[in-house]
Image (tube, coloured by chain):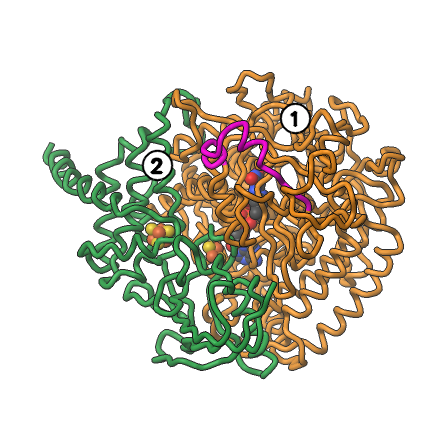
């Protein structure tokens, strides 16, 4: 275990949604390289409290890279410099003594800032509520082994289902689009045999709810590069294909 | 000492649940929409209940302090979920799952509840698959299973190392559908800070909006607390940072009994603490013990790297001590074995605070690809945290607090002793006795929410049909709101010198040292004199900066730490008065010659249910006797 010395932090402080916000400069004199990035912020907050100042507000919970609660643009990069790693799993050994680190919230129109580094990602929940499920009322399910699912299909569904709903894809996108998230959710269900009955209805509803809240995708691919779960951009192609099909199918069903 | 009516239905064990359902009062579909049910918590236990109750037609209000229901701590469960499907044809059955759970809990759980859990376990898998949970499959397309500690069959279903995530997303999506349809109203970033009882019935809750600090009441016909466990009382645990006891504790202070608070589980395979800034510990799933071998050097202070220690100089202690279960010995037993060796100086790693979990034999036998397929994401997680590659060097692991078997006392209907107030999932005490088996918490949460509560809740509600319930303008609600706002203003006004986190860390050290893996009379007594002293300091030297009218995580933390102090005192008193060792509760004074837990069935074959008395140092102990009609009280042996 060694220690990093003299870290300079530039942290975004904003009192509330209406405040315009600004950067504050702080110094961390010494921190163990085994500490995680959020533990470094804990140390900063303890320092602020002991100086009788208000602690920096930031979202976090599991600190294991699975709940999707943590966020943060670190030196302009969503979840910081380490590939496939959430902010909470980033460790200080990635940085050096004397480094300046800029810490900002997700910046996207659909994710308004609540306070300091905390944003409102409720728009993701709205997308799910509009169709991101399989209707299976409790109690009526058949035996789980009744429908065998080929392993590659189950694996592909699982690859998409690994999305943690963190919003890094939106924050990284120059347009603030949520296509990677929405496509991950849609493809998880659309790959599976259980998901077929509502495939078209689901796709149409989710894509249109997404469009109400978020910007549009112009294929930059920044989303996938920032995604801590390495969701592939291929899911976006599948979503687009299913959306076109759903427009056609749903219209046909309506005209019946 | 009172005894309680747990309302266990008549009949043979395997007929009780059917008998109950046949006799329970129902509410007809048109009347269901006249009832408002509050569900606090949207983890597996809460989301499944909210979705199902709304599908049935009840009006549901769901509360969570998280920004989204999908963040609940259930998301972090890695290894899997048990069910007595017997898909592997290896001799599993409902009765075997029942027996394993009763024995795993060291004969300190209620037979009828455990049997029902085993019965409904099979329905959970069907339900989750129908919802699109991508469980692992064999090449033929059927579901795959693995085995977990304390079992000799393979009954654990899993989705890579992300089982909790996939199950929670399933339950969350089902609940989101109801939010979209208007059956569930969702209150996110809202924390329960009190419950209200009027004329002996639970009338509703008081909550605090975490964005504005506004305090508000909500009235309902029934309130369900699905608010998770209290492992964070130890400060360092595998729980998510925000897990806390406040909901259960506030209900306790309003009259709900708190059962077996000292039954806390230490998980054997976590990454050891690395430095003093550490904020939490990370679990490495127990499923790793399927293929990993646990060992330490035979010689204390052997500082050679693992690959330079020859086979003959290694102690594969679990295989040596427990040959029939080997590396899959249950959690409490594996944890204590690790602690004893580390205490003797045989620990490994820079701080000598770990044991090896070695995959080299598995990699040789199965190939790296198979190991990667099974545990790839766990290996990746380990490497990120520990900075070492587990394909090359063994993982370093050590026990850490993980799960709490204790919780709100509930009867067979999952109702607390306060009519109308229910507790489900990890928040209640009901099914795991003194030790929970791996992969059984997810099973219990979903069993409670999907297949038990929706049946049992109507029994009470039926009697309320046509009656008006007290509204939030009732003086009892106003009184609770006033008290709550005084409490939060109080934290802001102490203006002392120490942060809530500082107190939490110090509290955690006391509890870990004296009420952790091994407990003694002297240790517990000293904790019971240190805790009130530290709590006094908390009340006079706390510092919360910022204000109460916008997001203030320091203030939220202060409220939670306050409740952890009071809970900590209850845990130590429970551990002190339980003069036996059972499951995860190990009192050094009560052990066999071989160092195993020594129960005292004559005096302690009961649930300890504590009643609040306004003085956290003087709660009243009640007992619910446990009667075993089917299982035979036996010494638990995994040799
Ligand atoms: C790292 C880890 C791995 C695990 N792995 C496994 C495993 O492989 N298999 C297994 O069976 N079990 C496992 N467990 C245990 C299991 O995950 C939990 O016991 C279970 O998920 C608890 O579910 P729950 O629904 O009861 O509570 P939680 O999921 O903890 O949900 C609690 C909910 O209550 C809300 N809440 C709490 N207090 C309040 C309040 N005051 N006001 C408003 N809302 C509140 C929270 O917001 C949250 O929504 C694991 C646990 C950990 C820590
Ligand atoms: S797709 Fe990736 S970046 Fe986007 S929300 Fe999901 S996990 Fe986060
Ligand atoms: S805090 Fe849960 S993913 Fe980072």
Residue marked by disc 2: A157
* Corner quadrant of residue B297: top right
Q: Give the residue drawn at x 52%, y 72%.
A: B552
Q: Quadrant of the N terminus of chain A?
A: bottom right
Q: Position of residue B231 (x, y in %)?
A: 65, 52
Magenta-tinted stretch: B355-374
Judge if badges 1 and 2 mark residues of a common chain.
no
Residue B337 is covered by the magenta coloring? no
Crowdedness near tag 2: few (<14), some (14–19) or many (≥20) residues, C-alpha within 10 Å: many
Residues B51 and B268: in front is B268
> Any atom of ligand 1 within 8 Å of the CB at mark 1?
no
- CB atoms of marks 1 and 2 within 8 Å: no
Asked whether B366 falls inside the magenta stretch, the response is yes
In this rendering, would A29 be left or right of B112? left
Q: Which chain is orange?
A: B
Q: In the rendered view, tell whether residue A233 sits above or below residue B21.
A: below
The image position of residue B338, as x and y in percent, is 73, 43
Could you say which quadrant of the image residue A51 lies in? Answer: bottom right
């Amino acid at each position: 275990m060694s220690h990093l010395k003299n870290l300079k932090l530039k942290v975004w402080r904003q009192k509330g949604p209406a405040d315009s916000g600004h950067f504050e400069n702080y110094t961390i004199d010494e921190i163990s390289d085994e500490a995680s990035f959020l533990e470094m912020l804990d140390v900063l907050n303890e320092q602020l409290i002991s100086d009788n100042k208000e602690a920096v507000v930031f979202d976090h919970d599991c600190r294991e890279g699975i709940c999707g609660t943590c966020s943060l643009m670190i030196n302009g990069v969503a979840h910081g410099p380490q590939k496939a790693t959430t902010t909470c799993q980033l460790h200080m050994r990635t940085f050096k003594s004397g480094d300046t680190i800029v810490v900002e919230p997700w910046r996207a129109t659909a994710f308004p800032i609540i306070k300091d580094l905390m944003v409102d990602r409720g728009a993701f929940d709205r997308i799910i509520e509009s169709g991101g499920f399989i209707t299976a009322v409790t109690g009526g399910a058949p035996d789980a082994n009744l429908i065998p699912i080929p392993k590659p299909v189950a694996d592909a569904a699982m690859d998409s289902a690994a999305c943690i709903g963190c919003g890094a894809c939106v924050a990284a996108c120059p347009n603030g689009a949520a296509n990677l998230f929405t496509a991950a959710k849609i493809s998880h269900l659309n790959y599976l045999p259980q998901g077929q009955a509502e495939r078209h209805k689901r796709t149409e509803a989710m894509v249109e709810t997404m469009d109400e809240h978020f910007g549009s995708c112009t294929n930059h691919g920044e989303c996938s590069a920032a995604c801590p779960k390495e969701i592939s951009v291929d899911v976006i192609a599948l979503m687009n294909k299913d959306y076109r099909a759903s427009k056609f199918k749903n219209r046909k069903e309506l005209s019946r | 000492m009172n005894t309680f009516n747990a309302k266990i239905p008549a009949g043979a064990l395997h007929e009780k649940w059917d008998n109950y359902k046949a006799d329970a009062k129902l509410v007809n579909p048109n009347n269901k929409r006249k009832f408002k049910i509050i569900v606090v918590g949207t983890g597996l236990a809460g989301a499944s209940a909210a979705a199902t109750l709304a599908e049935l037609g009840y009006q549901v209000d769901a509360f969570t302090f998280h920004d989204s229901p999908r963040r609940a701590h259930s998301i972090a469960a890695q290894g899997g979920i048990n069910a007595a499907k017997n898909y592997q044809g290896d001799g599993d059955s409902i009765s075997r799952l029942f027996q394993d759970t009763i024995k795993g809990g060291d004969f300190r759980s209620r037979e009828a509840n455990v049997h029902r859990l085993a019965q409904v376990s099979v329905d959970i898998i069907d339900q989750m698959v129908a919802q699109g949970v991508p469980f692992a499959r064999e090449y033929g397309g059927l579901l795959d299973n693995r085995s977990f500690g304390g079992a000799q069959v393979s009954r654990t279903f899993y989705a890579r190392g992300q089982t909790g995530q996939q199950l929670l997303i399933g339950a969350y999506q089902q609940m989101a559908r109801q939010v979209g349809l208007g059956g569930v109203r969702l209150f996110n970033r809202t924390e329960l800070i009190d419950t209200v009882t009027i004329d002996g019935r639970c009338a509703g809750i008081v909550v605090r909006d975490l964005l504005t600090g506004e305090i508000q009441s909500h009235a309902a016909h029934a309130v369900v607390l699905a608010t998770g466990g209290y492992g964070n009382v130890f400060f360092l645990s595998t729980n998510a940072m925000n897990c806390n006891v406040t909901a259960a504790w506030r209900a306790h202070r309003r009259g709900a009994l708190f059962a077996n608070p000292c039954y806390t589980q230490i998980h054997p395979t976590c990454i050891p603490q690395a430095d003093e800034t550490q904020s939490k510990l990370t679990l490495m799933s127990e499923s790793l013990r399927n293929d990993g071998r646990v060992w330490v050097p035979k010689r204390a202070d052997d500082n050679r790297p693992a690959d330079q220690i020859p086979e003959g100089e290694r102690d594969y202690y679990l295989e040596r001590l427990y040959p029939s279960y080997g590396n899959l010995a249950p959690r409490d037993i594996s944890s204590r074995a690790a602690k004893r060796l580390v205490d003797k100086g045989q620990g490994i790693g820079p701080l000598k605070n770990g044991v090896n979990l070695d995959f080299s034999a598995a990699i040789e036998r199965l190939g790296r690809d198979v190991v990667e397929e099974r545990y790839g994401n766990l290996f990746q997680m380990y490497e990120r945290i520990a900075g070492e590659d587990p394909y090359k060097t063994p993982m370093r692991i050590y026990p850490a607090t993980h799960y709490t078997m204790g919780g709100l006392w509930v009867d067979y209907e999952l109702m607390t002793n306060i009519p109308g107030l229910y507790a489900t999932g990890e928040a209640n005490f009901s099914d795991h006795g003194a030790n929970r088996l791996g992969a059984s918490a997810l099973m219990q949460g979903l069993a409670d929410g999907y297949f038990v509560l929706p049946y049992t809740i109507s029994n009470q509600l039926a009697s309320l049909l046509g009656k008006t319930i007290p509204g939030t303008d009732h003086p009892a609600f106003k009184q609770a709101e006033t008290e709550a706002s005084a409490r939060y203003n109080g934290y802001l006004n102490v203006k002392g010198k120490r942060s809530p986190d500082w107190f939490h860390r110090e509290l955690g050290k006391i509890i870990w040292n004296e009420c952790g893996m091994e407990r003694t009379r002297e240790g517990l007594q000293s904790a019971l004199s240190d805790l009130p002293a530290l709590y006094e300091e908390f009340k006079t030297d706390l510092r919360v900066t910022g204000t109460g009218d916008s997001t203030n995580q320091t203030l939220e933390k202060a409220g939670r730490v306050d409740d952890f102090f009071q809970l900590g005192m209850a845990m130590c008193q429970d551990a002190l008065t339980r003069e036996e060792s059972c499951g995860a509760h190990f009192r050094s004074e009560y052990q066999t010659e071989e160092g195993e837990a020594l129960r005292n069935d004559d005096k302690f074959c009961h649930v300890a249910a504590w009643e609040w008395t306004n003085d956290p140092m003087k709660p009243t102990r009640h007992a619910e006797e446990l009667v075993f009609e089917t299982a035979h009280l036996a010494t638990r042996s995994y040799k």
